[in-house]
Image (tube, coloured by chain):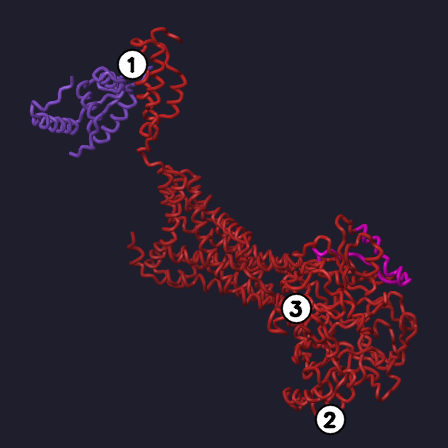
Chain colours: A red, B purple
Amino acid sequence: MRNPNHPKPPRWADRLLSWLVAPHLREEVLGDLHERYQLRVQRLGVAKARQRYWRDSLAYVRPAFIKRKPSEYPNPTHSAMIRNHFLIAFRNLMGGKSFSIINIGGLAVGMAGAALIALWLQNESSFDKFHEHQDRLYQVYGLTNPVGGTPYAIPETSQPLAPALKQNYPEVEAVTRIKDIDKFLVRVDGQSFTGIQGAFADPSFLHMFSFPLVAGPKNGQLTTISSIVITEKLARKLFGTTDALNKTIRLDSVDHFVVTGILKDLPPNTRFTFEYLLPWEYLKKLGTGWSNEDWLSNNTPTFVLLKPNTNQAAFDAKIKDLTQRYSGRRDVWTHFLFPLRQWHLYADFENGKPVGGRIETVRVFGLIAAFILLIACINFMNLSTARSEKRAKEIGVRKVAGAGRGSLIGQFITEAFLTACLAGAIALLLVQLALPSFDTLISTQLAIPYQNFSFWLWAVGFVVLTSLLAGSYPAFYLSSFQPIGIFTKQFKKSQLGLSPRKILVVLQFTFAIVLVIATIIVRDQILYAQERDKGYANSNLIHVNFVGDIEKNYSPIKRELIRSGAAVSVTKTMTDLTNESWRTWGLRWPGENPKDTNTAITLFSSDADLVKTAGMTLIEGRDIDSYQYPADSFSVVLNETAVKLMGFRNPIGQTISNRDRSITWRVVGVVKDYIVGSPYEKIPPIVIEGPGAWFNTMHIKFNPANSTADNLAKAEPIFKKYNPAYPFDFQFVDQEYARKFDHEQRTKTLAGLFAALAIFISCLGLFGLASFVAEQRTKEIGVRKVLGASVFNLWRLLSKDFVILVIIAFGIATPVAYYFLHTWLQKYEYRTEISWWIFAVSGAGALVITLLTVSFQSIKAALMNPVKSLRSE
Amino acid sequence: MRRSDLGEFEEVVLLAVAVLVPKAYSVMIAEELERETGQTVSTGAVHAALQRLEQKGYVTSVMGEATAERGGRRKRLFTVSALGGRVLTEVRSVRNRLWERIVPPTLLEWS
């Protein structure tokens, strides 16, 4: 609209000013300018007026006009609301101190328990994952597949297999063998050390696996025959310093080695345990007994690094018949590669197929961790909803004052978050305190990775998740109250019948009872196996490994031990009694069944007096005694299972031969079955050979008339005399036998620990809940008391509800626990029965604990003076 | 009363408000000052001075009516407050006293 009487001022100037000048001044400023413009148009003409207009406009470009006016009303931002949430949350925590302590304490204990398990799980799943080439590393396995027999996976290969792999297959980038050795006597400057774990390895070992060197070049390690690579830990032990490069170490007083490299200490999460590495060349130099170029002897773990983008399945097919080709026999094992990612957690084989392994334990404990956390969260939810009565009025007022549901949810989540943060901080402290004992319990080295960014990410995520989990129910439940219902107290009705709170209590106790039952059954299984007849007597029995000159001087040692009165009987054997020893396939006997000849038979050996020394029971015939019967070099003693397998009706005098019938043994005796290997498994058929076999250790039965210390004091000088270079090193067989139960003992301790934790947290919640119910019903109790109810009546009234819940929980827990533990027991050949009393005891126990927890509150409430309770309000 | 409380321009503007009340607003004051001094006076300068005066409590303001020349926008009308009046009087008396003490022959004449 262009009116000649009212020409418009420059539009751009107006635009500039509208943008520049503070909103509250815009009207008057622009009005003034326009009015003046009109005046000037009349006076000076349009052009001049426009010019002036610009100049006038620019006069407004000053802070006084540009500065925006602060709002005269408070401007509540989001952060202010959150601050308010925190304030209210803090006041609520402070307001109910005992509640807060129960709440935060329960949550903290739960979080700490879950965090410990999480740390362990993290450690378990990180095993050997730090190697740079971890996705291309494999272990070579053998797989026997006998006709009619069961396939059996062998984690070791023959020694010539590794070079053959490298030579024949371009897909192989590197290959290494590694053979553990702990027999060497390590000597430095006149000091000697025994029992240090070491290994022989090919030069490529340090290139394939990422064990970094802190000193010495990476290339060329383990290539020269007299070189040794040691860890920092061993360097400190031997030399007192990690600066040990080029120093000399003597092994077994024969050979000298120069330290060419110092390895950083191996992390706890690796399968390798060596403290020093020796070149494979040295093993070859040691010759017979060490080096073994036989393709048919599996004695060495072999590892392969494949080139990138190699298909494992295709490669497996190529190497399948490697041993068959090289040994020229079709009836021996095939090969396959076992990838690194499965080494630690999936290493169990059954019938030659991987069937899981530790992963099951990991899963079970992951489940337990989740449940512990869940129980703690349930506590939190329960206590929060229980307090809803108190908070209901507050919520009503807030709602009436205009609080939206979202804002109320925000408030409850904030409260949960604050509690979770406090609990998280306490949990971190608890974990730090509990970690050393937890480490001893599960024999690992766990540490809280404080420097790790992702750890903090996880920790924060953990807290946030917990607060969401724990806060969601109160947040959505409490915020759904209708204000009108709150003020007329109608909402109470919703708590009758099947309230969510009761379901939560049932869930909590179900889990706790399942854990208790599990603990008892695991304990039962251990006791059952411990009480199993071993078949030999392991008290007063020690074994001494053949190191140094012991084997050479065996006869005089034996003679002097018996003459000195320290020992009543001595025998040399293939391995120690508790060891699983050697297995063989393909022994032949008259009337053999091809299926049976392919069953693994355990080999053992003795020169004489085995039955007497080990306290075995002879059923038929006689013990091997190569001194009295020189022909006994090729005599054998069978155990009952072997007799059964071979189907001998009259075993004495029968003959057994090896696969190609080049050696024949005669059966001279039968002993009662005795336990080798796992006490949970069936006893395998055992063939005890005479002195024709080889020997690695000697067993000594001490004189029971003397004390063990006396016997040891007498034995030591004898060993010193005949084996001066070595310290007298021995093992008690009963201690070694007890070690077989370590794994299950640990399972039991852990299950017990977490059962206790679950019970504790559940009871904490129950305690809070009971105190709340008692508080709620103060008036009712007062009225009842006035009308003549006894303390017992009131106690029963208040405890009844909880007892019913626990009974329901027990009803659910029983079949669940039975199912899981029945499945668990199936993996043991020798297993206990699940008897009814276990369930009865755990049920009764849970009930007693519940009653104790609840009674404290209900008796307190019942004893209250009705005058006081009725007066309030 | 410290001198710095009332600048020279502010003083003139305050006087103009006193003169022009009840129709004292930026445009009128600027026009008036232009007429009186013969120099260009921008509304921006006047407005800024008025804001300062208002802050000091020497003037008060209300929004007035809208007119067509202003594009339908309202104007802000100023009046001198009691404090403003007293300040003006004081300033004037200071000047008067000084004027009176000038001996006539020393009065510098501009010509």
Which disc, if any, is residue B67? 1
Q: Look at the picture and state if A608 lies above or below A181.
A: below
First in sequence, mark 2 or 3: give its number: 3
Q: Are marks 2 and 3 in contact (CB under 8 Å)?
A: no
Q: Measured along the vertical axis of the image, is residue A838 above or below residue A391?
A: below
Residue A97 on image: x %, y %: 38, 57
Q: Amino acid at mark 2?
A: Arg
Which residues lie in the magenta part?
Answer: A313-342
Q: Is residue A817 left or right of residue A765?
A: right
Could you say whether the residue bearing mark 3 is in a helix, strand or loop? loop
Q: Residue at x 39, y 63 (%)?
A: A859
Q: Is label 1 in contact with label 3 (beta carbons under 8 Å)?
A: no
Q: Chain of mark 2?
A: A
**Left or right, A151 with reference to A712:** right
Residue A256 in sight in this render: yes
- What x and y, as percent, mark residue A20? 38, 26
Q: Helix, strand or loop at disc 1?
A: loop
- Regarding residue A596, the answer to whether it shows in the image is no
Name the residue carrying label 3.
A245
- Are the residues flagged by discs 1 and 2 from a single subunit? no
* Marks 2 and 3 on same chain: yes
Q: Are marks 1 and 3 on the same chain?
A: no
Residue position for label 2: A563
* Distance from Cα at disc 1 to Cα at disc 3: 98 Å
Circle 3: residue type: Leu
Amino acid type of the residue tagged 1 in the rendering: Thr
Residues packed near mark 3 inside 10 Å, few (<14), some (14 to 19) or many (20 plus): some
